[in-house]
Each structure stands twice: as structure tokens, then as C-alpha cells.
């Protein structure tokens, strides 16, 4: 089992709809979780972080964490064409190798 | 301003040549990482380092070498043994020993074999 798994996509969502991106992780000792957005040819940029079970909202973005299910998701409301990018899930597990692990990313296409 | 600087932005390599990609950070981060990204693909870890003079292989270390002589610097050498080096290379850094810390990325170096 890969340490951080994401569906590679592409995920196509109509403009104005909700985009739902999912990520699972294998190490129960993981403590913090991140979503990065990467535009083609650019470096990833952090858009959300979440550390405890439940939801965390920031503007149109909501991160959801369920540690029992080892599952983290990102919801994008009112999707815009500018949201078209690759979204990377990352997990931090201090004390165990102590490094940040990235998933392969999900490509999101917002259809005008 | 604090951040990570990668140079050069674009690099061209001839067949059989070694090239070195620079990565410098002034964030006082202990951990530094090198990733390779091919078109339409995710990040693949090449090497990472948690402390000066120590580093560990990632998933695709063959054909690459690194050094960590200073906390601020983590250069990556793409050797002639790397048969398909054309890719986008990303350097990142993070704090060690703290749970709520993310990775910060440089702007990347695009390497092309000519």
C-alpha cells in the first residue's frame, strides 16, 4: 500500500459545482495534513492545512479529516476555471522518518 | 524575505555531462528535499536530508547525488548515469520535529537534455 494515495484523475467538474478531492494515508501516526495546488510548470503552493478531525473552512475551500478512516478530503465550492490544476495531498509524520510525504496528485479540470 | 531559491530556472545538459542544480534556503529549516516531476505526473522523491552532512535516498536516487555541507544549501547533481534526466526539479524544505509544519517549495529548475 502506498503511503499517500490519490486518484490521478483527471476529475472534470462543471463551473459553479463542488469539486471533491480525496486522499488516503497508511500511517496512523501521521499528525498533519496539507493540500497543495500546482499549476502546470509552477511549483506547488499550500492552500489548506488540517490537524484535527472534522472540517476546516477557508473561503471556497473546505478540508475534511477523518483519522479513524485515514482519509482526508478537499472540497472546492463554486468551482472556477482558475481552479483547474493538480492538487497534491501531503502528510507529515514527525518522529517516524520525520519527513513530509506527498501523494501523486489529482488533476482537476473545471469545465466552463 | 525568507524563502527557497533554486537556480538556474532553465538548464540544458549535453549527453554524458554532469550538471548541478542549486537550492538555498534562509528559513532556518532542518529538512530539505529534492523531487523530480515529469509532465502530467506527481512528485517523486530523489533525496532528502534532515541534518548537515547526512542525507537519505528517496524513491528514485539512482543517477543523482547530493551534499549537505551547510544547513542552508542542498545542491543536487544529475550525473551521466541518469539516462533520462529531462524533467522539472523541485527543492523543498520544512521544520523538523514539529507536527504542524508544511513544506515550502522553490520555483523549480527545468532540465532538458540536448
Image (cartoon, coloured by chain):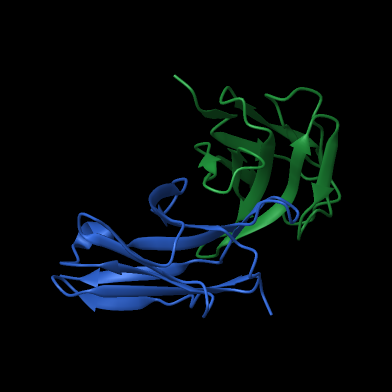
Chain colours: A blue, B green
Q: Can see residue B7? A: no
For residue A93, above or below residue A23: above
* Towards the viewer: B85 or B55: B55
- Displayed quadrant of residue B53: top right
**Residue B85 or residue B24, whichever sits in front:** B24
Residue sitting at the far top: B1
Which residue sits at x=59%, y=41%?
B92
Front residue of B41/B72: it is B72
Q: Quadrant of the N terminus of chain A?
A: bottom right
Image position of A84 (left or right of B41): left
Depth check: give the residue in front, B16 or B62: B62
- The image position of residue A25, as x and y in percent, is 58, 72
Residue A93 at what x, y percent from top left? 64, 56
**A57 to the left or right of A50:** left
**Toward which corner of the image does residue B58 lie, by quadrant?**
bottom right
- Which residue is found at the position 82% from the left and 48% from the top? B56
Location of residue A39 with respect to A53 vertically, above or below: above
Q: Position of residue A80 (x, y in %)?
A: 18, 62
Amino acid at each position: 500500500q502506498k503511503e499517500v494515495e490519490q486518484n490521478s484523475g483527471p476529475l472534470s467538474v462543471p463551473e459553479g459545482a463542488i469539486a471533491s478531492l480525496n486522499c488516503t494515508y497508511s500511517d496512523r501516526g501521521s499528525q498533519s495534513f496539507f493540500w497543495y495546488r500546482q499549476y502546470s510548470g509552477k511549483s506547488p503552493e499550500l492552500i489548506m492545512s488540517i490537524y484535527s478531525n472534522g472540517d476546516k473552512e477557508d473561503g471556497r475551500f473546505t478540508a475534511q479529516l477523518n483519522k479513524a478512516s485515514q482519509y482526508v478530503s478537499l472540497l472546492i465550492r463554486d468551482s472556477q476555471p482558475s481552479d483547474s490544476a493538480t492538487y497534491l495531498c501531503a502528510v507529515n509524520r514527525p518522529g517516524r522518518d520525520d519527513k513530509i510525504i506527498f501523494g501523486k496528485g489529482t488533476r482537476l479540470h473545471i469545465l466552463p | 524575505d525568507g524563502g527557497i531559491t533554486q537556480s538556474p530556472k532553465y538548464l540544458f545538459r549535453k549527453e554524458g555531462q554532469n550538471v548541478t542544480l542549486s537550492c538555498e534556503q534562509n528559513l532556518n529549516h532542518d529538512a530539505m528535499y529534492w523531487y523530480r516531476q515529469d509532465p502530467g505526473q506527481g512528485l517523486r522523491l530523489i533525496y532528502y536530508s534532515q541534518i548537515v552532512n547526512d542525507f537519505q535516498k528517496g524513491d528514485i536516487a539512482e543517477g543523482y547525488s547530493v551534499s549537505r555541507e551547510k544547513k542552508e544549501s542542498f545542491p543536487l547533481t544529475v550525473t551521466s548515469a541518469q539516462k533520462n534526466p529531462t524533467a522539472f526539479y523541485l527543492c523543498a524544505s520544512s521544520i523538523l520535529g514539529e507536527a504542524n509544519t508544511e513544506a515550502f517549495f522553490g520555483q523549480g529548475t527545468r532540465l532538458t537534455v540536448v
